[in-house]
Image (cartoon, coloured by chain):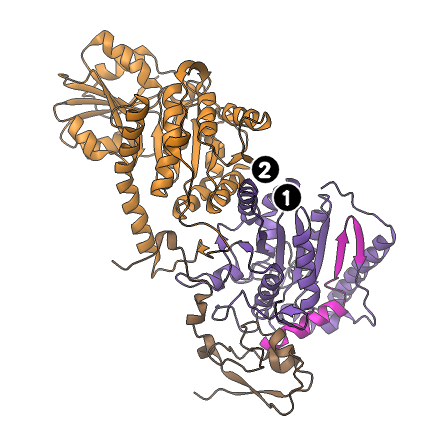
């Protein structure tokens, strides 16, 4: 059914469509429209879920974890400072292998306080053990959130669906809502808190066992790439809609020597410029964790020059996307661009300036 | 019909082989709480002594499902579990357990949130009056003039200068139906209170006084004796706040506070003036409780 | 690679019984069965759950704290030095 919605509402529709059982809520701009829409569904009887109105994001993520540990399909959402406050719990959730799905409306981190869009919030927690998928459109937000539940429940790795705050979350676009009940099925947890089969979760792991437990987590995280792709393919087959291979999407890349790599809704602008300028292709990183190294190498086989636009900083060092792309493609000419911080728009000029300056060294700020 | 001994089920759901210190008061609190809750229980535990001694991978001292998250989020995790069970239409007892550090300090916000939202969870705070697991640092539950590693009895400052935070009253002020204090010296009373708490259709809070021989510096065999003395000296008042009414256990033949203080090393350095100060402090608190009990409904129950 | 359970989950409830803490003690409770009045107070107050319904101490776990001896109303339990 075709409809026009804000991307935040599209996420909420996906949550409803997946029959999420427990929703954990705490408001923060610009994700709040997501949870407000979910709350509307619940209070109008359109969605049969229990809600926890948490008193902070730290408790919000904890409650989502508790619900998941007890065998319920759980969802929560946050941004920026909320994600930062919940940081302790993000590692707890991933370490406990709980299939929580969280939407993050990407927003800049304080200080100074800034409610507008960049990727500093989710980039700052890229090492927390969550699968991170970045979306470009309201449609992709719906499709990816649906897939996120399946991915999380199969891998027992929590999934973060990242959508640009305001520049995507608050933008109304046309999209198709799907009936996905049979696609996602019901969550049947293998390890849940059930008096019929008492388990202990969250033990003390001494130096004698911590490394092995983490080794399993790392291996599963690396292997989850296959699951992300597989579920993307299954969804594509059923609903006739996909985004590259589910990890990376390319646009106008064939026959090109230059490419622009970036994430999130700015990809839309890059596509327009690529059509106009015709001298570069666009590589959209959809899956940032696990990092699709193999796939990126293959895609860039014939590419010689790359511009990477990062929308976050790693103070004292190069930014994350550039660093990881550079590690993956050591023989290519890659330039690092910083753009779109704190809600500064990434315009057609930003894209053109990046591509124009490929070959320049250092960290080039496109303001 | 479960076999009972001295009014408690014989069955143990908290097992031997846990690595608490010899003579551990909180370990007894765990034992009794689990007897009250029974097999159809999920335990959510905060980081602390009882978590550490019972859950070293790959062993578990628990015969019920048990989850430990972080230090301050047991009430929040419990909230999520409660909603999950509600969404599935299943019934289960949920115990959220934390020490005084987890409950009085770092987890107070999460506790307040859980209570305000009305989750059907019984929160048990085992109070050994300091962050014992990390080596006996001061918590807001540490009593006045107690010697802890972060409030040492030094040449200039003599131990903790702040009085114990009146947490049971803070919880009661949230408008809950049932708050109680208890101690490990009267297991049947604690057991009954946990059962009462679990029967409430909403949150309940039990504060159980559980001395620690390591932190308080007393011989390992004196755990129960020192608890009894704390009650006799009115340091650990035992009461219930049920539907807003306070019911205080009266003490016949009250002891002087020094009978309690002299049993433990953490008050070893007190001089006569300081002991008098503590006596006055305890007398004032007790007087307040006695008067409060006469005033009828003193907390509005909104839950 | 040493085999570990995912997330370090422990699926053996009560498995701490494999950890015999009896090796910790320096003193050992010895009960004069004839004097015992079967009040069950020692059972009630043992933090290590070492005393069973038949009032027999499980020395595999007894840490020698002495609470049982202290609470016994007839003092039928004596703490003796653990022989090493």
User: Taking A267 as reference, is B186 left or right?
Assistant: right
Magenta residues (range):
B220-247
Chain B: give its colour: purple
Find residue B18 and report its horizontal and vertical position in percent: 48, 68
Q: Specify the farthest residue to the top.
A: A276
Q: Residues within 10 Å of mark 1 (few under 14, many from 20)?
A: some
Please give the residue where the numbered disc 1 appears in the rendered image.
Answer: B112
Position of the N terminus of chain A, as image quadrant, is top left
User: Taking A304 as reference, is B149 left or right?
Assistant: right
Nearest the viewer among B201 and A365 is: B201
Q: CA distance from mark 1 to mark 2?
A: 8 Å
Q: Is residue B285 above or below residue A360?
A: below
User: Taking C30 as reference, is B143 left or right?
Assistant: right
Q: Quadrant of residue C4?
A: bottom left
Residue at 55% from the left image edge and 82% from the top image edge: C56
Q: Chain of mark 1?
A: B
Q: Quadrant of residue A163?
A: top left
Residue at 45% from the left image edge and 19% from the top image edge: A166
SS at badge 1? helix
Q: Which mark is residue A55?
A: 2
Chain C: give its colour: brown
The answer to whether marks 1 and 2 mark residues whose Cβ atoms lie closer than 8 Å is yes
Q: Say whether mark 2 and mark 1 are on the same chain.
A: no
């Amino acid at each position: 059914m075709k409809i026009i919605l804000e991307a935040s509402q599209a996420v909420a529709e996906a949550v409803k469509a997946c029959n999420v059982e427990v929703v954990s809520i705490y408001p923060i701009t610009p994700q709040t429209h997501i949870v407000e829409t979910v709350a509307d569904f619940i209070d109008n009887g359109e969605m049969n879920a229990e809600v926890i109105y948490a008193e902070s994001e730290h408790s919000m993520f904890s409650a989502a974890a508790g619900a998941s540990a007890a065998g319920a399909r759980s969802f929560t959402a946050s941004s920026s400072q909320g994600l930062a406050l919940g940081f302790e719990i993000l590692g707890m959730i991933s370490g406990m292998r709980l299939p929580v799905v969280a939407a993050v409306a990407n927003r800049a981190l304080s200080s100074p306080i800034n409610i507008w869009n960049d990727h500093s919030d989710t980039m700052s927690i890229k090492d927390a053990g969550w699968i991170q998928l970045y979306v470009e459109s309201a449609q992709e937000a719906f499709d990816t959130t649906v897939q996120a539940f399946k991915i999380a429940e199969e891998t027992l790795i929590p999934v973060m669906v990242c959508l640009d705050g305001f520049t995507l979350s608050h933008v109304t676009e046309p999209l198709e809502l799907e009936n996905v009940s049979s696609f996602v099925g019901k969550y049947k947890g293998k390890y849940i808190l059930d008096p019929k089969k008492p388990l202990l979760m969250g033990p003390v792991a001494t130096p004698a066992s911590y490394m092995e437990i983490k080794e399993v987590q790392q291996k599963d995280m690396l292997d989850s790439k296959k699951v992300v792709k597989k579920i993307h393919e299954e969804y594509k087959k059923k609903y006739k809609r996909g985004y590259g291979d589910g990890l990376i999407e390319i646009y106008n890349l064939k026959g090109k020597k230059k490419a622009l790599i970036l994430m999130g809704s700015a990809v839309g602008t890059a596509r327009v410029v690529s059509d106009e300028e015709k001298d570069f292709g666009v590589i959209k990183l959809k899956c940032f964790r696990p990092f699709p190294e193999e796939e990126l190498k293959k895609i860039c086989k014939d590419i010689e020059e790359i511009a990477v636009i990062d929308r976050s900083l790693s103070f004292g060092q190069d930014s994350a996307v550039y660093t990881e792309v550079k590690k993956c493609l050591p023989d290519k000419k890659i330039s690092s661009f910083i753009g779109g911080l704190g809600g500064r728009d990434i315009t057609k000029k930003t894209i053109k300036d990046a591509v124009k300056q490929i070959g320049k060294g250092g960290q080039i700020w496109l303001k | 019909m479960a076999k009972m001994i001295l009014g408690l089920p014989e069955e143990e759901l908290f097992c031997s082989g846990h690595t608490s210190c010899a003579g551990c008061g909180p370990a007894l609190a765990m034992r009794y709480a689990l007897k009250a809750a029974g097999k159809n229980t999920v335990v959510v535990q905060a980081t602390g002594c009882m978590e550490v001694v019972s859950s070293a991978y790959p062993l578990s001292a628990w015969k019920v499902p048990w989850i430990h998250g972080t230090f301050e989020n047991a009430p929040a995790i419990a909230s999520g579990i409660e909603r999950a069970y509600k969404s599935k239409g299943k019934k289960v007892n949920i115990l959220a357990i934390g020490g005084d550090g987890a409950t009085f300090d770092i987890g107070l916000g999460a506790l307040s949130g859980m209570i305000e939202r009305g989750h059907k969870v019984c929160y048990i705070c085992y109070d050994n009056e300091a962050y014992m697991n990390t080596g006996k640092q001061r918590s807001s539950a540490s009593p006045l003039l107690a010697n802890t590693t972060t409030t040492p009895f030094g040449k200039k400052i003599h131990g903790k200068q702040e009085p114990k935070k009146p947490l049971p009253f803070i919880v009661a002020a949230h408008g809950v139906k049932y708050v109680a204090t208890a101690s490990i010296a009267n297991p049947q009373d604690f057991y009954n209170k946990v059962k009462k708490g679990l029967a409430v259709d909403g949150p309940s809070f039990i504060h159980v006084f559980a001395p620690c021989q390591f932190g308080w510096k007393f011989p390992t065999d004196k755990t129960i004796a020192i608890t009894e003395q704390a009650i006799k000296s009115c340091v650990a008042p035992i009461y219930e706040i049920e539907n807003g009414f306070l019911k205080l256990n009266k003490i016949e033949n009250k002891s002087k506070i020094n009978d309690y203080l002299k049993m433990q090393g953490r008050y070893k350095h007190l001089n006569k003036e300081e002991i008098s100060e503590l006596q006055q402090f305890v007398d004032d608190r007790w007087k307040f409780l006695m008067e409060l009990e006469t005033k009828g409904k003193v907390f509005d129950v909104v839950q | 690679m040493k085999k570990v359970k995912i997330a370090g989950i422990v699926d053996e409830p009560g498995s701490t019984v494999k950890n015999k803490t009896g090796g910790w003690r320096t003193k050992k409770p010895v009960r004069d069965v004839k004097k015992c009045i079967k009040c069950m107070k020692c059972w009630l107050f043992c933090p290590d759950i070492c005393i069973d319904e038949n009032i027999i101490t499980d020395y595999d776990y007894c840490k020698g704290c002495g609470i049982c001896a202290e609470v016994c109303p007839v003092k039928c339990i004596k703490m003796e030095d653990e022989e090493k």
